[in-house]
Image: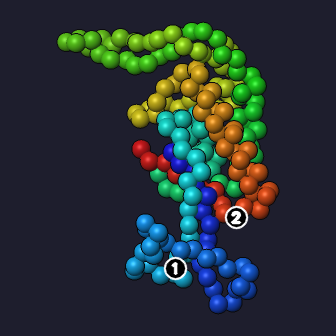
Amino acid sequence: MYAARRLYVKKWDHQPADERYSVKIARGGKPVVGIQDDRISAIEEEVMYWRKANHIHAWLVDNVQDGEDDCKDYYVDWNQLKELLRICKKVLKASKLIDGVVHKSTPLEPNSPVSVELGETGKVIKDSTVAKELLPRGVGFFFGSDDYDEDYLTDVKDTHDWIVRMLADHVAGVPGGIYYSSSW
């Protein structure tokens, strides 16, 4: 799961000089032969990476991708980021961690169709009602845990902090739009 800041940098003859971007491609300090700088049309900066944060992914699919979980790039507008930030704040405020058992895997017993739940001592959310309502876990192949635990909250906190940085950059005039993509 990735978020990128994409900036359109194509140079046009009609643009005033102070509105043109200059992009140089070099490797080892030397210009790359064969790439013409004046034909570069966009640059992309990876600004966030998640791993199996199924609750964040589900929100983005529902609210940015119109329910289409198709691994394509989607533009995330600033109002959508603000809404996800609002939700992250509410979930963080309402989620207190306590000692508990965190689910780690469900292997099958050798030579038996019976599976065995494996867990370990960790931190779980005492009352996950708000988390389940506002930012529910997703389930499915490759989706990671469905527990409301410390890992869940770490993803929410990381997402919160990332959005705060992106909004601050936007207010400060850092150019570029935010795009989300996932690959399963």
Disc marking residue 175: 2
User: At 74% from the left edge and 55% from the top edge, which residue is drawn?
Assistant: 169
Given residues 55 and 178, the one toward you in this image is 178
Label 2: which secondary element: loop
| Snapshot quadrant of residue 106 | top left
State if disc 1 and disc 2 touch (CB < 8 Å).
no
| Snapshot quadrant of residue 164 | top right
**Coloring basis for residues:** rainbow
* Pointer 2 local density, CA inside 10 Å: few below 14, some 14–19, many at least 20: few
Picture coordinates of residue 3, whole percent (x, y): 57, 51
Identify which amino acid the numbered label 2 is placed on: Pro
Asked if 143 appears above or below 61 in the picture, the reply is above
**Circle nearer the N terminus (2, 1):** 1
Q: Which residue is mark 1?
A: 37
Q: Residue furthest bottom?
A: 13
Picture coordinates of residue 158, whole percent (x, y): 63, 36
| Snapshot quadrant of residue 5 | bottom right
